[in-house]
Amino acid sequence: MAEIVVFHSALGLRPAIGRFAEHLRDHGHVVHTPDLFDGEVFDDLDAAVAHRDTIGIPILIGRAQDAVDDLPEQLVYAGFSMGTAPAQLLAATRPGARGAVLIQGALGLEHLGLDAWPARVPVQLHVAADDPWFDRDDAIQATAGIPDDLLDYHEYPIDAHLFADSDWHEHDAQATTAMLDTIITWLMRR
């Protein structure tokens, strides 16, 4: 089974992230859920994004790197929305990465300071087709530098951003169930 680090969205380490991690644990995986916001959680996305911006992306990336320092190198990195940035960066730059699961977001390689995606590091991306924060066009641009044989792309016919957070008003149970099933199957090969 895989060892996985899950990075939360700008809403913070909400109970939905804990339930996601528990679902993975129920399938035999070891899961870590670092809190990049030191306990702050939000029910308002605008306030959450403002908090993220106050901290700053470089500090959040540093916190994510610190969170994995004492963990083995052979990790799968997962992230929700804002959390996809550290997940994608660590999967691309930390030796031994076994993959990245990016949910509701991704960055183009140029934003990660990379010329190419590392060989043998698979990526699974889950997006809503009409996500107002990260739509199909964003996904195409973000994954342009990832070889097709490493990319496992999943798109859901919905228009919500944080659809996998069961406590969030945009939650879509059907898309979340499909996403979870797909992730579990993908992780079995890691």
Image (tube, helix red, strand yellow):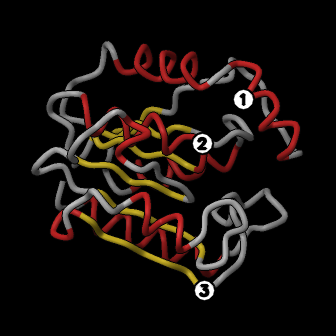
Q: Measured from the top left, where is residue 48 in percent x and y? A: 80, 37
Number of residues whose C-alpha sits closer than 10 Å to that of mark 1, classed few (under 14), some (14–19) or many (20 or more): many
What amino acid type is highlighted by mark number 3? Pro
Asked if residue 97 lies left or right of residue 52, the reply is left
- N-terminal of the pair, mark 1 or mark 2, is 1
Disc 2/disc 3 C-alpha distance (Å): 21 Å
| Nearer the observer, 159 or 110 | 110
The label number, if any, that marks residue 52 in the structure image: 1
In the figure, residue 40 lies in which quadrant? top right
Does 173 appear above or below 46?
A: below
Q: Are marks 2 and 3 in contact (CB under 8 Å)?
A: no
Residue 141: x %, y % from top left = 43, 63
Please report contact status of discs 1 and 2: CB closer than 8 Å, yes or no: yes
Dot 3 or dot 1, earlier in sequence = 1
* Secondary structure category for the residue under label 3: loop
Element under disc 2? helix
Distance in Å between CA atoms under marks 1 and 2: 9 Å
Q: State the image quarter where residue 89 is shown.
A: top left
Identify which residue is drawn at 42% across, 53% down: 24
Is 190 drawn above or below residue 66 in the view shown?
below
Residue neighbourhood size for the residue with mark 3, other residues' Cα within 10 Å, grouped as few (<14), some (14–19), many (≥20): few
Residues packed near mark 2 inside 10 Å, few (<14), some (14 to 19) or many (20 plus): many
The residue to which callout 3 is attached is 157
Instruction: Read off the residue under disc 2.
Output: 82
Q: For the residue marked with disc 1, what is the amino acid?
A: Arg
Q: Which residue lies furthest to the left in this view?
A: 119
Q: Which mark is residue 2?
A: none
**At 77% across and 38% down in the image, what residue appears?**
49
Give coordinates of residue 5: x percent, y percent. 40, 36
> What secondary structure is marked by label 1?
helix
